[in-house]
Image: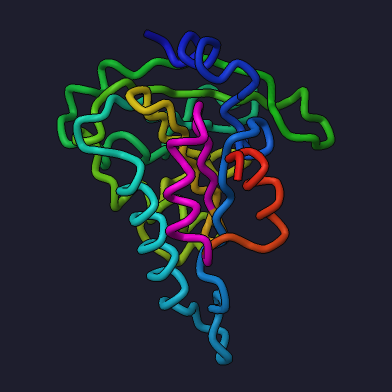
Amino acid sequence: MKIADYLSEKFPTVALVPSVYYQWDIGIHFSLGEGIYQFKENDELNLERFSTSYKQTLTIFNELFDKNDDLFLVTNNYKSKKQRQTTKLKVYQPNLRDKKNLKKLQLKTFPYPFEEEEKEDYEMQQFSLQCKVSDIKLEGLLKASLNEDFPPMKPRFGCDSVHYPDVFFVNTTKDIIFFVYDDRGCEVIARTAEKLRPLYEKYYGWVDEVDRERIEKGLGM
């Protein structure tokens, strides 16, 4: 199965670009590290912020995903059309337990999805790998997603392109899509509201008040 075939059947209105939460009625937007600023008063990075955001994303992931679930690990790489290939993208190589899975990577090229001047000069490469949750090293993937805007932080995905990569976790067993956009927040959508209601109720305090009306409507609450 290819990721495009799966999305067409299960999430027909969704494209795997930010923000998936606004492309589907059934979903939750979580705010991470609330009340903890990214920098201390002396302008040093506040590691408590990143530690808290990581613990939150790991908690949410573990509530939704089991180790034997089938998964598409999808990465968007945004690049200039003049750039022949990406040489520094560090998503799959360091974060797969069995490097043989690299041979199963699929690639498709799309138009650049963001509104920018001269956007016709850019494109989006979308890599996808079908595997099990147990095949990935989750810690590195989540932390690298959170560290997007802060180059001193490690690990990072690495990037020689025009935009930091976006990584999506597509659970084909439970029909759930999880996306950490940076240290400020993450999104989860599901095919059925029943999959997300318990999560919303349990971590209600991680949701901004401005988002609650839309979320509760989608969840039938």
Q: Residue at x 29, y 52 (%)?
A: 139
Q: Residue furthest front?
A: 221
Whole-percent x, y for residue 158 in the image: 44, 46
Whether residue 189 appears in magenta in the rendering, the answer is yes
Q: Magenta segment range?
A: 186-205
As rendered, which of 143 and 29 lies closer to the eye?
A: 29
Q: Quadrant of the N terminus?
A: top left
Q: Quadrant of the C terminus?
A: top right
As rendered, which of 22 and 48 lies closer to the eye?
A: 22
Render colour scheme: rainbow
As rendered, which of 142 and 65 lies closer to the eye?
A: 65
**Quarter occupied by residue 13:** top right
Q: Residue at x 59, y 35 (%)?
A: 26
Would residue 36 be found to the left or right of residue 73 on screen? right
Q: Residue furthest right?
A: 117
Whole-percent x, y for residue 114 in the image: 73, 34
Whether residue 194 appears in magenta in the rendering, the answer is yes
Is 127 rendered above or below residue 201? above
Q: Residue at x 31, y 39 (%)?
A: 65
